[in-house]
Amino acid sequence: MTRLSVAVRLRVVLGVFSVVFAVFAVDLIRAQWLDPVVAPEWGNGVSPRIVAVEAARGVITDRNGVILARNVPDYRLVLVPGLLPSEAESRRSVLIELQARTGVGIDRLVEAADTHLARVDPFRAVVVEKHLGTERAIVLRAALAGLHAARIEVTSDRRYEASGALAHVLGYVAPIPVDRAVELQKVGYSPEGRIGLTGVEAVYESRLRGENGRRLILADPLGREVGTLGDTPPRTGSTVELSIDLALQRAAEAALRGGIDAGLSIVRSVPARPQPVPGGAAVVMEVNTGEILALVSLPSYDANLFNGSTDAQAFERVLQDPGHPLVDRTYMETRSPGSIFKPLVALAALEEGIATADTRITSNGYISVANEYDPSIRYVFKDWAAHGSTDMARALARSSDVYFYLLAGGYREDGREVFRGMGADTLAKWARLGGFGRPAGIDLPGETGGLVPDSRWKEKTIGDQWLLGDTYTYGIGQGYFTATPLQMTVLAAAFANGGDLLAPRVVRGTREDGRFFPTGRQVTARLPGTPAHFETVRRGMLAAAALDGTAFTGVPTGWQIAAKTGTAEFGQPYPDGEFHTHGWFMAYGPFERPEIAVVVYLEYGVGSTHAGPVAKEIFEAYQATRGGPSRVRQPGGTP
């Protein structure tokens, strides 16, 4: 036997073993990864490949099942570099032919054919053009007949309904950021994939995304599929159900727009002042569960701008808008809340023994305080009116600044303490007990906690000593103290429910395979206080919503509510000594059996005049959309 014949036989044996091994390998892959099917016969050169099957993203609905974020068909032109000729001249000829048939520039085609990914996996499709219209997709599909290296693929795009009203809540999905590509590919994302970047889309990404499937195919030497060996179907993402009521959200948005315009009227009427940038926010929250029924921030934007098909100019207009529409004013931006902070100051004074419900203080429209180093210098701290002698409930009803100056900072005359106040550090303690200075815990990204100042903070941050005037302004919710509308809503709910600071939630739960998984009620802290002291504050807020109170403008038909107005000065004074003001309104109702808390914030305006009517419209919209009182589920109830 010659050496040549031995070598030939050896090659034949090795070839047989290779074929047998390949068969076993395919069977093993099919058994471990895929649902088995009968394998077709294949000829020489055919090889198995695993192809990922993208899962459909879960939809997002409001609490009533109205779809807010859905998937719609989308088309894209892709190039498969591995199906191009390997010889350079022939390869370029095919690309030139593709240019002629598709209209895509040769430079873009050359770039797509020679990416790093194409060198690693030449049979992975590279996206050349996306978001094709249906007509263009049909035309291109016909034009590409006979050219195997390029094809039209059907994928899906995210479409947001009612986006302007809910853009901040829903967020958006977008192509995978370059700086996260490697990290996300390790957990199964494709380079051309999309991911939730803001809002609910980002926070609940793992549930919305679903789980990709796999197909084991047979491919010929050109990479074309010639048979299927088995598959594991993709698992569609969960349905995420918001606590938001879309009808109430839209009503709150319309009411807020009207309030913003009304508040701007007082600024626009003064020609010497720069034209203001409109803005505002409104929050509606169930007081017993923490579920957010409406969360409105204006100006807003269209989340569909971020799907990649919008022209660059429209996108740039959003980025350059001086109203910062990408910022959600309900929980990302802080302001001085003004007098809607006074109910917490009142509770603190009661608990600290500084005052009782019957403590009376007289306001003649201002107090005058001597400079502690030079008594000949006196500072005047104004009230918005001369309220006369008031007890605590009346002081809340009429929003007497002098009353709360004294609760916060006390008063001395001729070196004698006339009234002992709490002081800045005790105020700071109670502000923190009320949930301020830290995020409220909403299930949305980017929440800020605001600022709770104290004497040490001022010395460390500003380099100045804390002054009595700082304490006075602190006591009426101004000065360095800042909060978000969402934090003020959580506080209002705590007064309504007896002291529970609830984590606000925009998602009620998720639905998977016909089952509902609620997010549940979460208490983040407890606002301390005796029942009697809570009742004193609540009665003061009830009086504020009476006809002779400052909050009467926010009272809805058929309900009693507990409320408080706020008007906070901001910016630099004008030559006439006047400031711009934020308008605030905080309330809950109905009073006897509280269901919802409402907070309205206007960048420009007066609490009673402009913010109150907005709250009234929101309360009445709630009555209309939810069928009136007593419709709120109690904690632990079924959805």
Image (tube, rainbow, N blue to C red):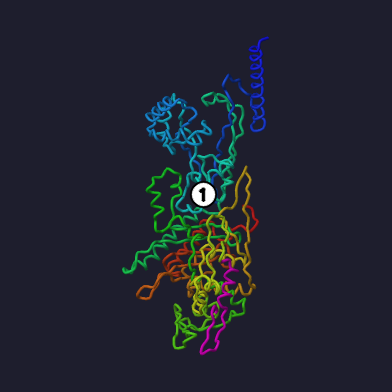
Q: Position of residue 248 (x, y in %)?
A: 50, 56
Q: Position of residue 398 (x, y in %)?
A: 49, 76
Q: Residue furthest bottom?
A: 414
Residue 362, relative to residue 76: is it above or below?
A: below
Q: Is 177 one of the magenta-colored residues? A: no
Is residue 63 something one can see in this rendering? no
Q: Magenta part of the protein: which range?
A: 407-436
Q: Is 431 one of the magenta-colored residues? A: yes
State the residue in front, 277 or 464.
464
Q: Residue furthest right?
A: 1
Q: Residue at x 42, y 33 (%)?
A: 109
Q: Residue furthest top?
A: 1
Residue under label 1: 197
Q: Position of residue 207 (x, y in %)?
A: 59, 46
Q: Residue at x 60, y 29 (%)?
A: 216
State the residue in front, 261 or 446.
446
Q: Residue furthest left?
A: 271
Q: Residue at x 55, y 25 (%)?
A: 219
Q: Quadrant of the N terminus?
A: top right
User: Does dot 1 land on a helix, a strand or a loop?
Assistant: loop
Is residue 313 something one can see in this rendering? yes
Disc 1 marks which amino acid?
A: Leu
